[in-house]
Amino acid sequence: MSTRASNIRKYHSPININIGMLVFLCIFGYLVICVVMYFRSDPVVGYEVKKGSLSVNNIYEGIALRNENVVTSTDAGYVNYYAREGERVAVGNLVYSVDETGRLKDYLTEHSSNDNPLSDSDLLEIKSDIVNFIHNFSTERFNHTYDFKYSMQGTVLKLANNALLGNIEALTANNMSGNVNLCYSPNSGIAIYSVDGFEERQPSEIKGSDFDKEHYNKTLLLNNHLVAAGDPVYKLSTSEDWSLVIRTPNHVATELKELEYVKVRFLKNQYESWGKVDLLGICDDDSDSTFVELCFTNSMITFCTDRFLDVELITEEEEGLKIPNSAIVQKEFFLVPEDYLQQGNNSSSFGVIREIYNEDGSKSSEFVETPIYEHMNSEYYLDDSQLRIGDVLLKPNSMEPYTVSKRGGLIGVYNINKGYADFKQIQILYQNEEYSIVKSNTEYGLNAYDYIALDAETVTVNDFIYE
């Protein structure tokens, strides 16, 4: 029994490889290779080309100068205003009164507490001012909040005063008319209730230190405040002609002078207007900068309370296809005379006839299909993946030879619509630091809604795209 047991051997079954296992191994190997290639390659980020525009953005801060006449008080007492700031007043319109005793203030307080003299239109204007302030609020200029506060207080009181003091008989009945001096506008213009020392300043007198806001002092003329005879009570802007003085680099000033007129966008409300350019001279504190005056004949009332204005000069504006600069690449091509290109016999594709040598040393020719990337100056830009320097091309019909050697560069992007990187030539209309505007609907270029590689350095021509 023990002898028979020792002769027993374990049977090893042979590996049975069938066609199904081979297919599975091939698919598995392909998937492994794809995964490795994906992790070893940088994913290509696509960018959808869309129509857009770029402006030549030149943003400057300017000092607004107007025809401003400061009106001073002829009497001492408490001032009460009736014309709203920024409102046009005619000659002889009631602007303010001077209360010598202060009784008018008590009278107004008593009557305003019992009734709301503001109309729906007045309340709507106040709400509009509040909305504009919220929209333009900036933490960097928080001091403007106090200006807005005092301005709103004054506006409400002026509207209330205008409603209550419309009835002069009420003043007479309360024996206050003799103590209240009603003051009327000597000229027509826009009423402004602040002074800052720039009222008499001429554009040629502006200095570099005037742009320092830390030393800028603006005095608000508040309602119900005490004034002495000769103190300023308000000022009138009497003309629609006004100007804005800005500082620009010398070369920009020269360009603006050549334009004569420049389109100006006011950043406060995005209002646009054309300004006439006048050079005032080199800045006193910076020899590399020039004072430039922009003259306007409208919109003065819109900015009558602003001394400093941020503006954007729009010297040119281009529209086309907007693409990021990171997608732009330069590539070299062979330049071949247009007479050497023809269509293939059995297809609509273009190519060239190249001379070749057979094994026995005899000459022959072959048709080489090659993509066209640009046609310029009677020459075609052809891809160098099919051609080499020294190749001899034959002109159709005449068989006149041409040796490939001349090269030229094109600026373009990689189109990835078909899943691989395909170079497309572009014509840049305008370019800034981030984006370029390129011409649309060119024969060998881009179209709207094409997808391109966002970073041209991550791909080369004919690469398959892994997104």
Image (tube, grey):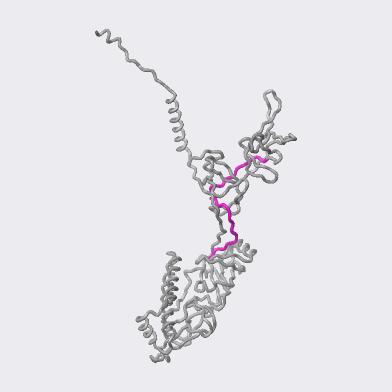
Q: Residue furthest front?
A: 346
The segment highlighted magenta reads: 311-335
Residue 279 location in percent, x, y? 62, 68
Residue 357: horizontal and vertical position, in percent?
Answer: 68, 27
120 displayed left or right of 202: left
Q: Is residue 464 left or right of residue 276?
A: left
Is 462 located above or below residue 449 in the figure? above
- Residue occupying the far left of the picture: 1
Majority SS type along the magenta span: strand
Q: Position of residue 90 (x, y in %)?
A: 53, 82
Whether residue 156 is situated above or below residue 310 in the rendered picture:
below
Q: Position of residue 6 (x, y in %)?
A: 28, 10
Query: Which residue sits at x=64%, y=36%?
Result: 347
444 or 204: nearer the viewer: 444
The residue closer to the viewer here, 257 or 122, is 122
Q: Quadrant of the N terminus?
A: top left
| Closer to us: 341 or 253 | 341
For image coordinates 62% across by 45% down, the residue present is 444
**Identity of the residue drawn at 47% across and 36% down:** 37
Position above or below: 293 against 431: below
Residue 319: in magenta span: yes
Labels in figure, total: 0
For residue 354, what is the image quadrant? top right
Residue 325 inside the magenta-drawn segment: yes
